[in-house]
Amino acid sequence: MTPIRERKADHIDICLNERVAPGYCYWNDVRLVHNALPEVNADDIDLSTALFGKKLSFPLVVTAITGGFPGAKKINSNIAEACAELGIGMGVGSERAGIAGADPDSYSVICDYDVPLVIGNVGAPQLVEQRSKDRFSVEDVGRAKELVDADVMAIHLNFLQEVVQPEGDVNTKGCFDAIRDVAKAYPTIVKETGAGISREVAARLRGTGIVGMDIAGMGGTSFAGVELYRAMAAGDEIRMNMGESFLDWGIPSPVSLLEARNGLPLIASGGILDGIHVATSVAMGASSAGVANAVLREAAKSADAVKSKLMLIREEFKAAMLLTGSADVKQLSKARYVVLGETRQWLE
Ligand SMILES: Cc1cc2nc3c(=O)[nH]c(=O)nc-3n(C[C@H](O)[C@H](O)[C@H](O)COP(=O)(O)O)c2cc1C
């Protein structure tokens, strides 16, 4: 396999077999206030919502995970089948490899299913000059969009990962202009990958013309953690130590969500594990929640396993709606919550 395909395969293996999250669940710090007299009939609760002009049966997106190596096709196909059946959104992993000709069908397999919201994916580091590598043009992003027939393109920010991995793409200059150029050409969102988006960055990003953000904060998958295990396998002590030092670097997801609110639709992700977290994120201002690692194990098994997991999340989400007296997602967005623990300290 080429190095990029090997790296993609490593990411999946590591996330399936190792603990790559910092270990503190920030979403559990946010509690929805219980309504003992909800006066809502569970059968009438409307879980549906709209995101980027597409209707979702409940506010959830399976965010970017993979593509670009032989084993990725099955994973994306399992996720896409489940997302289509449940009527929720899905993103594919970075399309850099696919555009270079590596297993394009591992991405385009999403087109075999009727997924209501398809999110393509390219990395911000690829949009600017990186040492000897060619940069992606706006037209290349267009090819990535076509490959999966994306409704929206996500540009991911993953500089935590780039800075801890060997030979990472560490020129971050010019990303703002590049994002603005892509956003002019196609409906575009910016997503983090596990370190969160601050108030200041959210305000700057707003000026690029993007249509939304996925805050992907700290508390779930840590790419410093993933790189730690890759460095371990390679016997690279410096990178191992770097991975460990930066394992909990970033803005906790619920804090990032509150900071990034500036009128654009937000996907709340990074450590979302269940339907209560989904409901909490909506009450805190998210248009939708996002999950990656929480469905990875199932995605490696079968479409049915992914479906069962997503159905559980939907049931928990519906129960949280009932218990907050929310007959629809708009009402849930006004539900009262309290913030405890480390998350509260962050906010103070
Ligand atoms: C195995 C794996 C691969 C990922 N690859 C990508 C990627 O290619 N592009 C991207 O934008 N995010 C990628 N992500 C990040 C996720 O989309 C998400 O932002 C992050 O994992 C936080 O969500 P989680 O805590 O639910 O995993 C990946 C996540 C995992 C677990």
Image (spheres, rainbow, N blue to C red):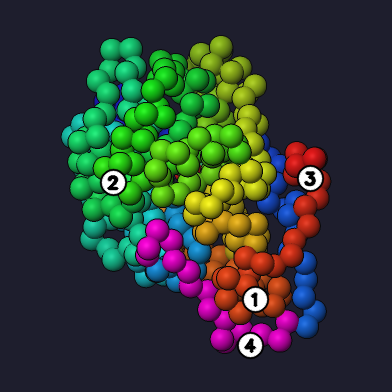
- In the picture, the disc for residue 41 is 4
In the image, 301: left or right of 342? left
In which quarter of the view is residue 38 placed? Answer: bottom right
Which one is in front in this view, the residue at disc 2 or the one at disc 4?
Answer: 2
* Disc 4 + disc 3, Cβ < 8 Å: no
Mark 2, secondary structure of its residue = loop
Residue 53 magenta-highlighted? yes
Q: CA distance from mark 2 to mark 4?
A: 41 Å
User: Tag count in the figure?
Assistant: 4
Quarter holding the N terminus is top left
Q: CA distance from mark 4 to mark 1?
A: 10 Å
Question: Residue 323's x, y, as percent?
Answer: 71, 75
* Disc 4 + disc 1, Cβ < 8 Å: no
User: Which residues fall within the magenta stretch?
Assistant: 38-54
**Residue behind mark 2:** 186
Q: CA distance from mark 3 to mark 1?
A: 25 Å
Give the mark nearest the N terminus, 4 or 1. 4
- In the picture, the disc for residue 344 is 3
Q: Residue at x 20, y 36 (%)?
A: 139
In front of the other: 6 or 253 = 253
